[in-house]
Image (tube, helix red, strand yellow):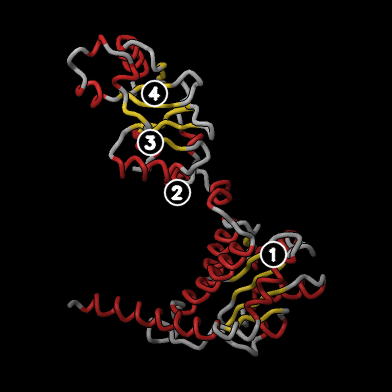
């Protein structure tokens, strides 16, 4: 094994040990601080304002993004910019989450003073219980003592990993309390592959769909299949409910005397279908497991509303 891989494994092992220590102190609820932090955020009428300097600031931006995408309005405010006018972004309806490994970062002083002056709830995250930040905070979250992965104690590595994990823990605790669902997440994340997976079937389905009645002659059914270009047609009964589907496989099985038959004689009965409110990911899983290329979308009464094709998932990047 190369010296580079030895270093990589040591770094990951050191940071993993830091996370294990964090989990251990969380077993005690960080002295009750974690629960108080969650309750403080839940009681806020405004946003979570997150601030930190240097690496803590970069971690803070990520925590703000995670909170915002999981149902907790959040914004990162740079502490140096706050001292030059951005304190106006922090209101009495907000709660401030401030990050500093040492708890003594001088650039945080003005924002700390602002929260004290206007009685804005302050949650502090630091590794020193007696630091200025945690002594001033309404809720103190003390990170456990753990060595940085650099071996010299000078490069923020383990400490930033623990801080980010703690931010994730807060975000998920808040998310679960609010019963945040994939549908809610989709509202804040419509783009990319993840957004596509969280789309509803109704968002992707075609509504100009191939349909023929059960009594339709196969000549008519073949014309509909050709015109709609899905390679299939649905078959409906007299009440308009989907009772069957005609695919190329059905055509091959009934090749002899095909044009003398009607749709009901050729169709496959009780085809697979899905509701319009189902997640697109569910429809894709159904199609892949059944090895089919089209899936009809039906109402609760079984009436066809649309059709979704495997090409729709290719177009959105889901496969």
Residues marked 4 and 1 touching at CB (< 8 Å) = no
Residues marked 1 and 2 touching at CB (< 8 Å) = no
Q: Which type of secondary structure does the marked residue at label 4 adopt?
A: strand
Q: Is residue 214 left or right of residue 2?
A: right
Give the mark toward the camera: 4 or 2: 4
Image quadrant assignment for residue 20: bottom left
**Residue at image mark 3:** 272
Total of numbered circles in the picture? 4
Does label 4 or label 3 sit earlier along the sequence? 4
Residues marked 4 and 3 touching at CB (< 8 Å) = no
Crowd rating for badge 1 (residues with CA inside 10 Å; few <14, some 14–19, many 20+):
some
Give the mark toward the camera: 3 or 1: 3
Q: Which type of secondary structure does the marked residue at label 3 adopt?
A: loop
Does label 4 or label 2 sit earlier along the sequence? 2
Residues marked 4 and 2 touching at CB (< 8 Å) = no
Question: Gap in Å between the C-alphas at discs 1 and 2?
Answer: 34 Å
**Residue at (38% x, 86% y) in the render:** 151
**Residue at image mark 1:** 82
**Residue at (46% x, 27% y) in the render:** 306
**Residue at image mark 4:** 234
| 64 lies above or below 110 | above
Question: Gap in Å between the C-alphas at discs 4 and 3?
Answer: 11 Å
Q: Is residue 289 left or right of residue 156?
A: left
Position of residue 165 measured from the top left corner of the image (x, y, whole percent): 50, 72
**Residue at image mark 2:** 194
Q: Which quadrant of the figure contains the N terminus?
A: bottom left
Q: Which type of secondary structure does the marked residue at label 1 adopt?
A: helix
């Amino acid at each position: 094994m190369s010296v580079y891989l030895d270093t990589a494994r040591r770094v990951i092992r050191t940071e993993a040990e830091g996370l294990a220590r964090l989990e251990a102190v969380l077993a005690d609820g960080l002295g009750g601080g974690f629960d108080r932090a969650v309750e403080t955020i839940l009681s806020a009428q405004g946003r979570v304002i997150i601030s930190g300097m240097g690496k803590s600031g970069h971690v803070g931006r990520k925590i703000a993004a995670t909170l915002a995408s999981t149902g907790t309005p959040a914004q990162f405010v740079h502490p140096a910019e706050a001292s030059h006018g951005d304190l106006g972004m922090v209101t009495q309806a907000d709660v401030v989450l401030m990050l500093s490994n040492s708890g003594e970062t001088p650039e945080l002083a003005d924002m700390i003073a602002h929260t004290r002056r206007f009685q804005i709830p302050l949650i502090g995250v630091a590794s020193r219980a007696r630091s200025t930040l945690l002594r001033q905070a309404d809720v103190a979250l003390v990170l456990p003592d753990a060595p940085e992965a650099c071996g010299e104690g000078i490069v923020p590595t383990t400490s930033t990993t623990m801080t980010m994990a703690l931010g994730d823990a807060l975000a998920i605790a808040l998310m679960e309390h609010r019963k945040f669902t994939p549908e809610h997440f989709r509202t804040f994340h419509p783009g990319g592959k993840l957004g596509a997976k969280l789309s509803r079937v109704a968002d992707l389905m075609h509504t100009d769909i191939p349909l023929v009645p059960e009594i339709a002659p196969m000549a008519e059914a073949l014309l509909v299949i050709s015109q709609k270009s899905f390679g299939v047609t649905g078959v409906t009964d007299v009440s308009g409910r989907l009772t069957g589907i005609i695919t190329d496989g059905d055509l091959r099985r009934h090749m002899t005397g095909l044009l003398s038959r009607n749709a009901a004689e050729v169709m496959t009965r009780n085809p697979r279908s899905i509701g319009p409110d189902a997640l697109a990911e569910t429809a894709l899983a159904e199609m892949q497991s059944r090895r089919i290329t089209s899936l009809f979308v039906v109402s609760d009464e079984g009436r066809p509303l649309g059709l979704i094709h495997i090409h729709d998932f290719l177009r959105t990047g889901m496969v």
